[in-house]
Image (spheres, grey):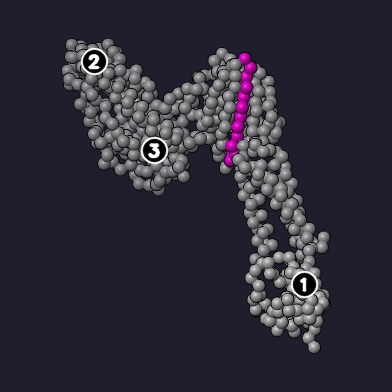
Amino acid sequence: MRRVAGFGLLALGVVIAVVGAVGAVAFGPDDRMTTGTREVDTDARAVVTRPAVLARYGPQVSVQVELPDDKPVFLGLASTVDVDDYLESTQRVEITRYRVPWSVTTKDVAGDPFLPAAPTALDWWLEATSGVGGAQLRFELPDETVSLAVLAMGDADLSGLRVTGAYEVPGAFGVSLGAAVGGLGIALLGVVVAGLVPAVRRRTPSLDAAAFVDDEWDEPWLETDPADADTWDDFLEESDPTAPTRKPSKPWSTKLTPSRKPRSAKKQKPHQAQRVPSSEVSGTDRVKEDA
Amino acid sequence: MTARARLTAVVGVLALVAGCGAIPMEKSSTEVSKIAANHTEIDRTYRNLEKARGAAFTALDPDILALVESGSVLAVDGGAIDVAKRLNGNASTGSGISAAQVEDVYTPRLSEYPLWYLAIARDEARGVRRIQIFERETSTDRWELTATPEALISTVLPVPKTSGDELETVDPDDGTALVASPGDALRAYAAALGDPQSPDAGQVTADSFVTQMRAQAAGLAKPGTTFARTWASQPVEHAVRTEDGGALVFGTLMRQDGWVLTPGATVSWPADSEQRAYFGEPMARSGVLRYYHQVLMYVPPTDGVGLPRVLAQYGGVIDSEDTAGIATP
């Protein structure tokens, strides 16, 4: 069971990591997934998307169009009902299918070589902009059937039209990167849980654990001066009144820890409470057991 | 829950949230349609209508009305201005100018033009409630008022049925669950107005509008003239479902009043009448006046009470014709 869970975590982590990595690469640090600049070959007055092209909603989209020779251009997003009626009799190119990053299917529709009315005079555009030689429109895809229209204004047409589209998801790069890292973490966790590599284990003490039950910690250390901290050597000196006087150890040297404390230390408790000045003690560094 | 499980859950939630923000969602509907108008458009349209009507009736200029009205409403209002000008010159009578407050708006979801919506406005000064249809013929046209039957404020109107925010409409030729289809009900009503003995007369209610029109016709049959009145109906364009399962039908009836004068006969008409405006004083030749009457008809459901009846109307003369015919003695 533990092994199955481990492999599950591993698979999940890999998927998240891959998705995150792909997202991070796709969006890039500017949080934009772009189509690149693409040329649309037409001399019509209008290029319009069918509803299937903008079949999703949610993310912010940025569309930039460019026309040579400073031709005026209009870029608008509106309900398909409005756009269909507006361009019903106009020669146009319909983009019927789109796949990322740039795979489109188009259809040429014959009609009048002019628009029935100036697009700037209409009030049903959800989002619109216009410019000379180019225009850029940023909008959030709404949850209704909409069409995007690129329209030539005045006597101009759309020959030489270049389009750049991009999905904009604020923070997408960071989130994707986070997902990739998180996915790797989950995968690593899965590896450990599945037992594919030994987990980090605590080393088994060589001594009897019962021996470390020591009530010496019930009593505070006497020293409060960091310069006079207890060290292993201090302890040995304190334990052996015959030990020779030692030069004080460096401040904050290795402290005495229970795991390093010899089993016999339990019996030396009286010495800890009666600390003997170092000038009064002598003898060796060896631990001297009480008789 | 162990620390490891908690960590896994947190990572999972974060990944899910991240995914929701980044991945475009499938639209709830792929149907090509839209709510006919939003509140901004509706408010702007009504302000423009009030402003244009005020200016048109003040200046007695029907061209201004053409900016905000069309169809039979424009014909009726244009006729009213024409009558006023014929009777009073270019001096404004002030009629037709009264502000109203919009009480309710009902907008259907439509898949193609023309777009339209229903508004109910209260005209306190005249003591009426206007039940109006605004229509946009094409995407390049403006919103225009195309129907505005009026009911007394005391008249109880059936409540239009909505699904969510969308007004439910009824096909004018579909009589399912109704005592008659909207189109058939209006045709029967026109027939009943023209001939009380008509077989269709039993299919509709002889309401106050029928009574009023018959009484008026009797008053117009002046001595020395042969008076004839005919009625016809235009096809129904708008019908909406009511909460009781019935239908509110917007229709236009055409009425034609014709007088054929006997030789040497003359007719005198009231000072502010359209007959005087078009035929002069005294009337000494035969002629025809044509009228439009916009009606709001209620068609009950099959399990409802009563027969189709008119709840509101708005009408007036739209033009005249000098037939110059003289009745044979």
Task: Categorize mark 3 by other alpha carbons within 10 Å: few (<14), some (14-19), many (20+).
Answer: some
**Residue B319 falls in image quadrant:** top left
Left or right, A160 with respect to B301, comes to right
The quadrant of the picture occupied by the N terminus of chain A is bottom right
> First in sequence: mark 3 or mark 2?
2
The quadrant of the picture occupied by the C terminus of chain A is bottom right
Indicate the amino acid at tag 2: Asn
| Residue A162 to residue B122: above or below | above
Q: Please, which chain is the residue tagged with disc 3 on? A: B
Count of numbered marks: 3
Magenta region: A57-69
The residue singled out by tag 1 in the image is A246
The residue singled out by tag 2 in the image is B90
Left or right, A91 with respect to B318, comes to right
| Residue A136 to residue A181: above or below | above
Foreground residue, B51 or B120?
B51
Q: Main secondary structure of the magenta part?
A: strand
**Residue A153 pos. (x, y %):** 55, 18
The residue that appears at 64% across and 56% down in the rendered structure is: B10
As measured in the structure, the alpha-carbon distance from the residue carrying label 1 to the one carrying label 3 is 100 Å
**Secondary element at tag 1:** loop
Indicate the amino acid at tag 1: Arg
Foreground residue, A179 or A128?
A179
| Residue A6 to residue B130: above or below | below
The residue that appears at 57% across and 32% down in the rendered structure is: A138
